[in-house]
Structure formats: structure tokens, C-alpha cells
Image: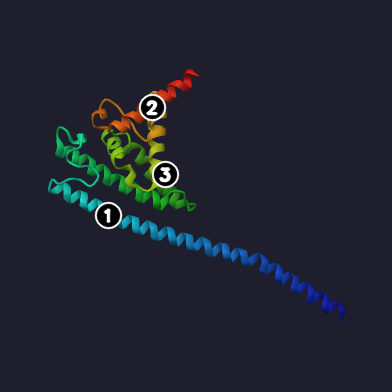
Amino acid sequence: MNNLEALKDVAQIVYYLALSISGPLALLGYLHAKRAEQREREHKAYDELDKKFLEYQKLALEHDLDLLDLPDASAYLAGDRLRRKHELVTATCGFALFQRAYLTFHDQADDFKARQWEGWDQLLSSFLARPSVQDAWQIGRLHFDRSFQAHVDERLAAHLEEIGAAPAEVYAFRKTGLLVCVRNEHWMTPENLALWKSALAEHEQGWAA
């Protein structure tokens, strides 16, 4: 009888231990699933808004109307205005495509998704090598998901280092998200030019110290 009671006590202990382990694991699994559902809803909502944004941009381009993120009075459009609009809308469509790939494949444990993202990431690096794309990114980057913004900025900074850009310029870009040069200086706002020059000076002072 004593052995039976002892066995019963052990069984109860094992049962409660199992509950103490499985309970938190079940809760963690539930919370993880809810977070995944929330991310999926957010990505779906963002994707729908992004599509509507691009539809408007294309419509504005077709009828030569103001773009949402760039009025016709912008200095960026000086010269061949229609061509500049085409370049901006085309680049924006490209970034929207890369963003969808980023949100779908980036940082995934699944081998297939990891391989898919590697190819997209290589294409993104090539895409960012184009001056018109770099300019378009500076105009429209705030329209995109923050984590995607950070990834594109990092890829662009890596590109600048690969082509031998001045360290002060790479530093200023990482700090401000701006990339000022002779090609685009004329359409930069005074505030952005001041930020850029301040970052350059900060880098030079750091090296001098």
C-alpha cells in the first residue's frame, strides 16, 4: 500500500511538472502565433496601401499630374520633367517590389525563403548602383517600412564603400540618410544640405581629433 501511495505521489509530481512546462510552452506558442498573425495583417494592409499609392503615381504620370511625394514645382523635375517623373515612378515601383520580397523572405529560417531572399538582395544591390535610383530613394524612402529603409540604407552604404566613396561621405550618408553630390545638390532643401554638411564636418573633426 505504501508503494502504491508513493507511486501515486510520484505520478502527481510528474503530472504537475509536465503542466509547469507545457503550460508556459503553450502560452509562448500562442503568443508567437498571435504575433505572426498580427504581422501578416500589418503586411497585408501595408501591401494594399502600397498598391493604391503606386496606382495613383502611375495615373498621375499618365495624365501629367503632381506626384504624391513630389510636386511639379520641385527642383528635382528641372529640365526634362516628364523623363524625371518616369524615372521616379519606375524606381518607386522597383522599391515596392523589393520591399514585398524583403517582407516575405528576409530573416526566415526556411532554407527556400533564405535562398529566395539572397537572389533578391543581389538584385537590390545592383539596382541601387544607378544614380537615378539613389535620387529616387532619397525622395521616397520614408514611404517604406522602417526595417526595409534600414536595409536599403545599409546596402547603399556598402555600395558607396565598394566604389571608393570618401569615408566622410559614407559617414554622412549613414548618419543622415542623404547622399549629396553635384548631380543632385540643386534640388536638395536647405535643411538637408545643412544636415549633410554638418555630418561631413563632424567626420572631419573626429578624424582631426
User: Which residue is disc 1 drawn over?
Assistant: 51
What secondary structure is marked by label 1?
Answer: helix
Nearest to the observer: residue 204 or residue 58 = 204
In the rendered view, tell whether residue 42 sits above or below residue 152: below
Residue 177: percent from left, percent from top: 37, 35
Q: Residue at x 58, y 66 (%)?
A: 26
Q: Position of residue 7 (x, y in %)?
A: 80, 75
Reply above or below: 136 against 183: below
Amino acid type at circle 2 is Ser
Residue at the extreme bottom of the image, as rendered: 1
Q: In the orientation shown, which residue stands out farthest toward the left?
A: 63
Q: Which residue is mark 3?
A: 118
Q: Nearer the viewer, mark 2 or mark 3?
A: 2
Q: Is residue 80 left or right of residue 137?
A: left
Distance between the Cα atoms at labels 1 and 3?
24 Å
The amino acid beneath tag 3 is Glu
Cα separation, mark 2 vs mark 3, equals 36 Å
How far across and down, in percent of the image, does residue 191 sit? Answer: 31, 33
